[in-house]
Image (tube, helix red, strand yellow):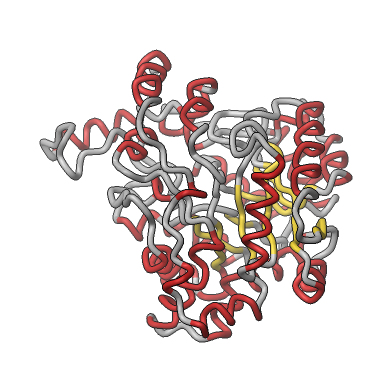
Amino acid sequence: MKKLLIATLISAATFNTHASIETKDWHEFASKEAKQFVADNIVLDFYASPSGTGFSKNSEVANYIDLAHERGITGASVTLGAPHTPNLLAFKFEHRKWTKASSAAKTPIRYVKHVDDFQKAHDNGEYAIMWASQTTMPLEGDAANVAVMAEYGVKTMQLTYNETELTGSGVISMINGDTSGLTDFGKEVLDEMVKHGITVDLSHTSHHTTKDITDYMQKHHKGVPVIYSHSPLASTYDCEPHETLTETEKRMAQKNLKKGDPDFRLAACYRLISDEQAKTVADMGGVIAVTATEWMMDGVWPEDITPKQFAEMIDGAVQIAGIDHVGIATDDMMTTAKVVPFTIANPDKYADNGYMVSAFNKGSTGCAELSKHMAGVVDSLWEMGYSNEDLAKLFGGNLMRVYEQTWK
């Protein structure tokens, strides 16, 4: 499997990559009213741009933040912990890199410590940055290090990133047949996260582990909500979110689908979540933040995601989870030009039978940079019948409610 994936990625490394920062800017097509709405309200993003992969120069981050702020984006949840931070030292290094890069912006930065920092940033003309971790690897197997992550300002954390970690299994492990779930160490980590006010994030985590997590939280931490920080719903695209690679192969054979057929899949779109997962989190009072990342739009894979398509992803989640339990995220890498080399260097993290790279090759190379899409998304949601109150919830209010309940 790994050899096959590496060969696929190497062969794909020469394709013409369209970085997110280079994709179509939809801002000029939006109405003045929509632009003003974004400026007048709290709008929160989520992106994942590790140093060396998402950016290599501080000016790249600075320019990105300045444009976002200019167009009314209040701030973002920024990923520090991911596959490039396999230990605590690497995490601390990433923290320094991102702090230095973000502080290079012309826009004043407010590093989020409390929920009201989002409002303060909005009122004071600042850009709010809250730190997130998409892995527990920096803990180095010691749950006591959750306190260290909290001291460094981490406000949300996933227990796994794609693969199996000491805490449980991720979605890539799941499609490769791993049926394991939450471990005893994972339970210790959850207890420490609740104790130190870090919101539990279920994105990237296998459905086996997410079920164990939500069961554990409802039994031992009743009333504490959890989130999916960047996960669209499978039902929006009528796809199968939990299939193993073997099951997908069998389904393709049963339908007599072969490579080249429009409906052929190398894998199920494993990053999408089921209606059941979404409803469980909603019942717990949590939030599913939908990410406008093109390769997760199973089978659509446009050259540039449109604001209308982004709005349709949001609407699909609202239809299942309800208006009080949906948020937004881009999962933007700032530039996807370095994504393929990164996946080559980390084959265990992306052993998906070539699904993601295949989607990239078919055009899904953007992540809907929020400053270029947000006003257009407002127009599209208005056309769908959403009220201003609804949009305020979707763009930040719902997540802030959860943060108010989970941060200490």
Q: Front-most of 345 and 189?
A: 345
Kindly give the residue lying farthest to the left in the view shown.
Answer: 256
Give percent across and percent down for residue 105: 75, 53
- Where is 315 relative to 129, above or below? below
Does residue 141 appear anywhere in the picture? no
Would residue 280 appear left or right of 95 to someone viewing this image?
Answer: left
Give percent across and percent down for residue 252: 19, 36
The N terminus is located in which quarter? top left
The C terminus is located in which quarter? bottom right
Q: Front-most of 221 and 371?
A: 371
Report which quarter residue 186 is drawn in.
top right
Does residue 159 appear anywhere in the picture? yes
Number of callouts: 0
Give percent across and percent down for residue 183: 65, 33
Residue at the image position 82 percent from the left and 60 percent from the top: 110
Residue at the image position 67 percent from the left and 47 percent from the top: 61
Would residue 244 appear left or right of 279 to someone viewing this image?
Answer: left
- Where is 37 relative to 395, above or below? below
Residue at the image position 67 percent from the left and 56 percent from the top: 65
Give percent across and percent down for residue 381: 44, 77
Residue at the image position 43 percent from the left and 52 percent from the top: 23
Kindly give the residue lying farthest to the top in the view shown.
Answer: 3
